[in-house]
Image: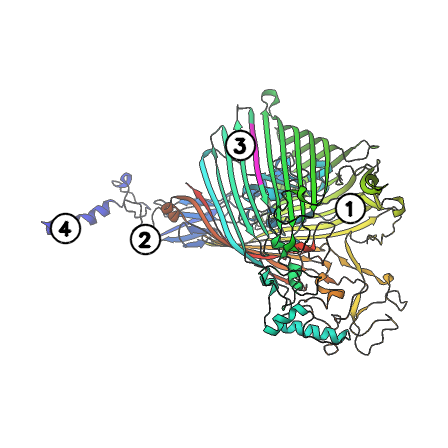
Amino acid sequence: MKIRWLLVLCVWLPFERVFALAPESHKNSSKPTSLLPLSKTGTRVADIQVTGIVTDDKGESLPGVSILLKGTSIGTTANSDGKYAITIPDGTKDPVLIFSFIGYTTEEVTVGNRTSVDVKLLPDLQSLSEVVVVGYGTQKRSDITGAVASVPKTRLSQLPVTNVLQAVQGSVAGVNISQGSSVPGSAPSVSVRGQNSINASTTPFIVVDGIPLSKTGGSLNDINPNDIESMEILKDASAVAIYGVNGSNGVILITTKRGTSGKPTIRYNAYTGIENYAHILKPRNGEQYLQKYKDYMIQTKQTQTSPVPNYDELPNYNAGITTDWIKESSQTGILQDHNLSISGGSDKARYFISGEYLDQKGVIKGYQYKRVSFRSNLDVDVTNYLTVGTSLFIANNNYDGGRANMLNASAMSPYGQMYNADGSYKIYPMFPEQLYTNPLLGLTTDRINRSTNLNGNAYGQIKFGGVLNGLKYRMNLGYTYLPTRTASYTGRAANDLLGTANTFYSETNSFVLENILSYNKDWGVNHLDITGLYSAQQRRYTSATGKAVGFVNDQLSYNNLGAGATQSNSSYADRYAINSQMGRINYSYDSRYLLTLTARRDGSSVMGANTTKYGVFRSAAVGWNIMNENFIKSIASISNLKLRFSYGKTGNEAIGVYGTITTDNTARSPFNGVSTIGAVAGNLGNANLHWESTLSRNLGLDFGFLNNRFSGSIDIYSNTSKDLLLLRSLPIITGYSSVWDNIGETSNKGVEVTLNTHNIDKGDFKWESTIVFTSNKNRIVDLYGDKKDDLGNRWFIGQPVSVVYDYKMTGVWQTGEDASSQDPGAVAGDLKFADLNGDKKITADDKMILGQTAPKWTGGLTNTFHYKNLHLSVFIQTVQGITRNNPDLTYADETGKRNTPIDVGYWTAENQSNTRPSLAFKNPRGYGYASDASYTRIKDVTLSYVFGQKVLDKLHLGSLTAYASGRNLHTFTNWIGWDPEAVQQPRGVTSSSGDSWVNNYPVTRSFVFGINVTLR
């Protein structure tokens, strides 16, 4: 019986398959068909060739179009006539062909039962119709008349960074971002189009979701990069004048993600990795250290009685024990970040909620940074004309912990003793040398540094109808509460025999209220967009400081200042306010001719009492969409062409609160045997102080060729800043050292180029590149109205604001050379300097400008490769034309007291070095060793894999991406030191910007692995 049924089955199956070859509608047809053989499941039963032709929207053939069989690597390319042929193999289920071509939308076509498939591709106008966030609104990119740069979204979403500016660095033309320190949680410095001001702040104004973040006490460290949807940078007068007094240094606009209608979408993004030094400036090992000491004694003509300089080095020397102090002060840095978000909503209400936990352990022991943040964005359509919403976030930043000292670690003798007999840290490892303490002493201190940013923004928007159709009113209300707390205690274990405690508390309360009225109207080929604003902003700041010295023991730490023998305290409070009115008109005719007019009036509390405190800032810009002209439309090779020009004025009020008021400071002094509080001169005010203003001109060209295979922009700008907020020096006999005044003038001129190219787009493989180039020439036009230099501040007419002014080193005096006719007193091994004025001696008159501290030009190159689901991005950054003094090349009279880097050599009578002095050279003139700090860096490389639908179906996921990323992988430079970008301060020095030698922290290299998951 079983054999009989088997025979029946064998006979039936072929007939069943034959009948299944044709659909029901064709079974009885006698007409021939061009149908493909399919099984019941739609699976092909034989290789079939599909042919066709690809045309554009005008019906003209498109050569070079890529055709790919979805889910496979089978592909082909259309020939010169737009024709193609592709073979679909046996067994392919429900075949789909993907047609793609640069400058056109990608089409996916289901083949079904056809052997001939013709396709029409439409131009991809997304780049032109892309909506870009501008001040107080949005615009189509094709309608923008100003210089507005959008940060590539891949830089925002695919790079593991703690501060979003780290991802932007080098990728946007005209924006100079420098990471002077890699201290965990540190924020990069940023400037847009050069340095306009000399003494006043040049930091760009930052706006998040329409509400200012600047001047609230907050920073971009408070913003979770995962929450950012888009980031625009406004650069010229037309773009920034709408922010008036806040716009002269550029404006950064950040828009965070918001919910969309639909079922909830849950996303989890996480990465973890390690950090280490990008480059180590290695100290000398034991043998090299001994040789240096021997040479030092010879060159200083001293008698060497011991193989090592100090008594406490002898035990380890005799035992053959050496210590790598850099290694002992370091650790493998660990970085991890976890971000969970959920978004969704209905037609009436949409939400986005996210939470983040970031933990970064530094490469130097004790350094760490933690951030916990939460965000909630909500939009509700209450009616068809009323929409309300909120943007709330809270961010807690934690920088707690005592820290090791890298400078002391690099100075330690390899024979120094780290521990005492009881296991505690030895305070002076090279005793009796007491200039350098144990680099690990900081780990014994108690230290907290915390801040919390509680930010709540709400809005309400009304859309009018009927005769008022196109009119909208929006009210924005923002409030920020930002408390900070720092405290420290240094006790006996850290070489403070009395014990010192410090505490600091501050609180910032800020609010902003904005009323925005906008009107949009289209008639015929005309478009009109009008925006009006009235806003008020206020900030109140208070702080309290306490200090106590002299504790019985170290048990109470900073928790009871009253236990100290002596206490001191102080407090401070200020208030800042600004009121503003603004109007803007955008007009376009036939999407060809564009006009933007802007005026803003700001009144600031920081301006002088004898002024109106108000300033008016205006700008005008025109644009010409040449691409929309008939004589250009016929040129197929041109995809986009737009000319822009803007002219306008912006302001700067970036001085401290109460800087225009004369104030006294308190001082305690004995009077009749009693300690009495008195008053001493503090700040000399200037009641006539008013705005610093910047006049800006910008000429720009946006272009695209060969269906946007090549696209980008070129901008040429010229900025002139007048009435600078400058600290004028005063004779100290007046009781004041300086006073704020409106004097001086600077200029910035530059060129910015952005070029996007689609190099290869064939089948599964694509290669895209982005090139950015920026050149800026900054100079001082005038200082005090007399066109004279200020040597004391090193400000020179016609030169950049920040320069290196020093002697010109020409070599090293060698044995037998006579220095008496050029530098009397110099001996062999001393540095040789040029006698510029020819007076046969080296004096301050022989100093010259050796270079500028800001780059002459910067560039970035991003190459992105795609192969199927695999993606590779390589970003290279270059910074050129920087000159900086190098503290790692000079130790002056400390040379014989400390270890020195092996890369920093020294002159001997045998090697006759012409670049390095002898160990006996004390650098009496304070030469700064100006060095070329230019560099080219492999900034980041990211390899990612996007899992296909089959894997997602098995895992029941919506999407899954895994990636590996490396940052600061290699640097090409002539700089001798830790890194040309890192700021390293000499021992005992704290710069005016707050960079301290105790926090010298080199640039780090990181390797991370991460996943981005979307749940179904």
Q: Which residue is mark 3?
A: 378
Q: Which corner quadrant holds the C terminus?
A: top left
Q: Which residue is mark 2?
A: 90
The mark lying in front, picked from 4 and 2, is: 4
Locate residue 964, reporting x and y percent: 50, 54
Q: Are marks 1 and 4 in contact (CB under 8 Å)?
A: no
Q: Nearer the viewer, residue 973 or 994?
A: 994
Image quadrant assignment for residue 873: bottom right
Where disc 1 sits, the SS reads: loop
Could you tell me the amino acid type at mark 2?
Asp
Label 4 crowd (10 A; few <14 / some 14-19 / many >=20):
few
- What residue is shown at x 84% (from left), y 53% (from top)? 792
Task: Identify the residue at the far top of this view.
Answer: 466
Q: Which residue is mark 4?
A: 6
Q: Nearer the viewer, residue 414 or 619?
A: 414
Residue range in magenta is 388-395
| Chain-order first, disc 2 or disc 1 | 2
For the residues marked 4 and 3, what is the alpha-carbon distance in whole angstroms? 66 Å
Q: Which mark is residue 199?
A: 1
Label 2 crowd (10 A; few <14 / some 14-19 / many >=20):
some
Locate residue 818, reporting x and y percent: 85, 76
| Chain-order first, disc 2 or disc 3 | 2
